[in-house]
Structure formats: structure tokens, C-alpha cells
Image (tube, helix red, strand yellow):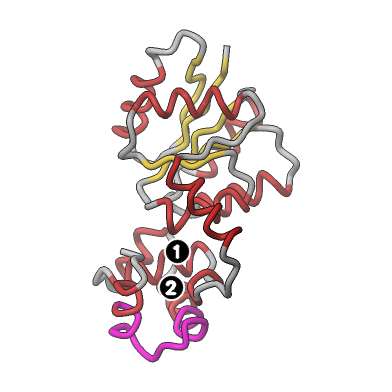
Amino acid sequence: MIKVILCDDHAVVRRGIRDTISEAVDIRVVAEAGSYPELRELMRTQPCDVLLLDLNMPGRGGLEVLTALRDEGSTVKTLVVSMYPEDQYAIRCLRAGARGYLNKAGEPTELVSAIRTVMQGRKYLTPEVAQMLVDKLSAPQSEELHASLSERELQTLQKIASGRKLSEIAEELMISPKTVSVYRARVLDKLQLGNNAEMTVYAIRNGLL
């Protein structure tokens, strides 16, 4: 039996994933978490084989969780299930230690197949992600400027470009407005931009929204 922990801050999403998995006789959801602190506590007391992890989490984001698990030497196989498009996050997640990346808009049967694949010790790649990796290997070139952004910096860029105010971003990410301002300044510096309008144009041109 493959034991799975779900980590997503939306209870409705967790229920949908749990219902999908319940149809597989060899997979069982043993626990659920809505935040990183809840996940950490669960992983101390509840053994599991596969962690299904969302990226857009309050407080500590999914990429930070992946990095923390990797640095701790965790043996849990992590499969990222996110609403973000593969072309912006999949390779980042794989580099951070994820065994696979799935978009929440994908077919339910794909999730079951992915869980079984990572449980066997293999990485699960959708055709889209596999093609991205092939493209990077066959045509090495300098990375786009936004490839240097951290997870929080990228989220800040995307939210500002979507019209969010700094106070709204702070509330959504559960950090202080001052910290959001620091991320904004770093984004402007790394992308060599001057203001929010230029950030919005950059995000649109590079398909970050």
C-alpha cells in the first residue's frame, strides 16, 4: 500500500485529490496538511511514501519546502501538484528535489499514474516537461533573467503584474509589507527594470501570467 500525505492550503482541492486517489486500491491518503507547519508536524508522527505538494502555500512556499526536505535528507518522494504552468515551475521543482510535476488541470488518472511511478523510484515527467528538458539539453543558451529569481521573488513579480497591491501580496503570502517591498526591489534589480509598469510588461512578454 502506498501511503500518501496531501499538502495543499485549499480543503476543496484536497478533497478532490483524495476522491481521485480513493479509486486506486493500492494508494491511501493517510494525512492532510494545509500549511508547512502542519506538514512538518505530520511528518514527525505519520510515516508516508509520497508527498503531494502544492506550490502556492501560505508562509513557506512549495519550493522552499522541497529544498528543506532535500537538505534534511528526507526519503519521502515528493510530487508537486500545482496550478502553475509547467514552463515556469517544473524544472525549478525538479532541481529542488521533486520527483515529478503535475498541473492541477490534468487528467485525474494521470495523478494515480504519477504516484505509482515515483514510488518505483523513477521521475514522472509529462510530455510537456520532457520536451522542455530536451530543448534545454539540445540548445544550451543563456537563461532568461527571471530564471535567477527565487520562488518568492517570482511570486511577487507575478502578483504585482496581476495588479495586486503590496499589502494584498503581503496578506496572501503571510509576510510583512516590508518584506514584499524587499522582494520587489530585488526583482527590479535582477530584471533591470524601473517600475511596476515595466514589471507587468516583462511578465506578459515572458508568459509569466
Q: Residue at x 35, y 80 (%)?
A: 199
User: Measured along the vertical axis of the image, is residue 14 above or below residue 195?
Assistant: above
Q: Give the residue number, with chain letter if any, for mark 2.
A: 180
Q: Position of residue 131 (x, y in %)?
A: 48, 49
Estimate the spatial distance between the alpha carbons at disc 2 and disc 1, rounded to whole Å. 7 Å
Three-letter code for the amino acid on which mark 2 is drawn: Val
Q: Give the residue number, with chain letter if any, for mark 1.
A: 175
Instruction: Name the front one of labels 2 and 1.
Output: 2
Q: Residue at x 38, y 42 (%)?
A: 103
Three-letter code for the amino acid on which mark 1 is drawn: Ile
Dots 2, 1 in contact, CB < 8 A: yes
> Which of the two residues, 113 or 161, is positioned nearer the viewer here?
113
Q: Is residue 196 magenta?
A: yes
Question: Which region shows up in magenta?
Answer: 185-200
Residue neighbourhood size for the residue with mark 1, other residues' Cα within 10 Å, grouped as few (<14), some (14–19), many (≥20): some
Write down the quadrant of residue 194 in the picture.
bottom left
Left or right side of 74 for 34: left
The quarter of the picture where the C terminus appears is bottom left
Of callouts 2 and 1, the N-terminal one: 1
Q: Position of residue 152 (x, y in %)?
A: 48, 64
